[in-house]
Image: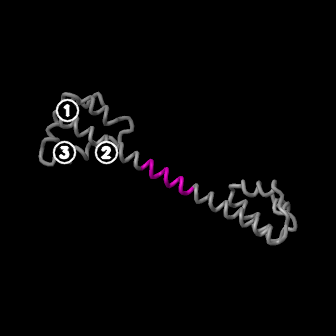
């Protein structure tokens, strides 16, 4: 596609300089950048260098905006993923503590090995099963019998 861009330089430059041309060209360039997986606006700008200065400048501005949006979206996704992981870890820790509290309340002795196994488990479904079994367990090992 880039091989033909220079042929369009005059048309794109006239578009950019027309009434509301910057908005029309901005829309076109955003579409091209998003729709074309192999086209980068910086490359687009480089091809137009010296042939369409208005288009070249606008392409760079849009590239910067799209890059900023992509970075922002990536950060938001990372925050959401981190929040979800933190919530899952918090639920796992709370359930593990509940298991240990139930066993303690029932007078069931818990070795450090068993305590570690319960606290290190990150599988909430498994922890939920152990919590149910802890309600009737006569020994700490009883909660692991269903595995």
Q: Which residue range is magenta in the image?
A: 73-84
* Proximity of marks 3 and 2: CB atoms separated by less than 8 Å: no
Q: Is residue 63 left or right of residue 97?
A: left
When asked about the image quadrant of residue 95, the answer is bottom right
When asked about the image quadrant of residue 31, the answer is top left
Q: Crowding near pointer 3: few (<14 within 10 Å), some, many (20+)?
A: some
Asked if the magenta segment contains residue 75, the reply would be yes
State the SS at label 1. Answer: helix
State the SS at label 3. Answer: helix
Is 65 rendered above or below residue 52? below
| Sequence-first tag of 3 and 2 | 3
* Proximity of marks 1 and 2: CB atoms separated by less than 8 Å: no
Q: Is residue 105 left or right of residue 73?
A: right
Residue under pointer 2: 65
* Proximity of marks 1 and 3: CB atoms separated by less than 8 Å: no
Expressed as whole percent of the image width and height from the top left, the position of residue 45 reads: 27, 33
Q: Please give the name of the residue rendered at 21% of the width and 37% of the height, measured from the top-left corner.
A: 55
Q: Is residue 44 left or right of residue 82?
A: left
Q: Crowding near pointer 2: few (<14 within 10 Å), some, many (20+)?
A: few
In this view, the residue in front, 44 or 112, is: 112
Is 143 rendered above or below residue 60? below
State the SS at label 2. Answer: helix
Q: CA distance from mark 3 to mark 2?
A: 15 Å
Residue under pointer 1: 9
Residue under pointer 3: 22
Q: Please give the name of the residue rendered at 70% of the width and 61% of the height, measured from the top-left corner.
A: 125
Expressed as whole percent of the image width and height from the top left, the position of residue 90 reads: 62, 60
């Amino acid at each position: 596609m880039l091989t033909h861009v220079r042929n369009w330089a005059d048309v794109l430059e006239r578009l950019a300089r027309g009434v509301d041309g910057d908005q029309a060209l901005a829309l076109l360039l955003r579409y091209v950048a998003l729709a074309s997986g192999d086209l980068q606006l910086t490359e687009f700008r480089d091809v137009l260098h010296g042939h369409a200065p208005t288009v070249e400048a606008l392409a760079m501005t849009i590239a910067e905006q799209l890059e900023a949006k992509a970075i922002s979206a990536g950060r938001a996704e990372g925050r959401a993923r981190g929040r979800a992981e933190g919530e899952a870890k918090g639920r796992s820790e709370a359930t593990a503590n509940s298991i240990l509290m139930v066993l303690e309340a029932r007078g069931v002795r818990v070795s450090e090995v068993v305590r570690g196994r319960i606290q290190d488990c990150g599988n909430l479904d498994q922890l939920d099963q152990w919590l149910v079994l802890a309600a009737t367990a006569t020994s700490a090992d009883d909660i692991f019998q269903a595995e």
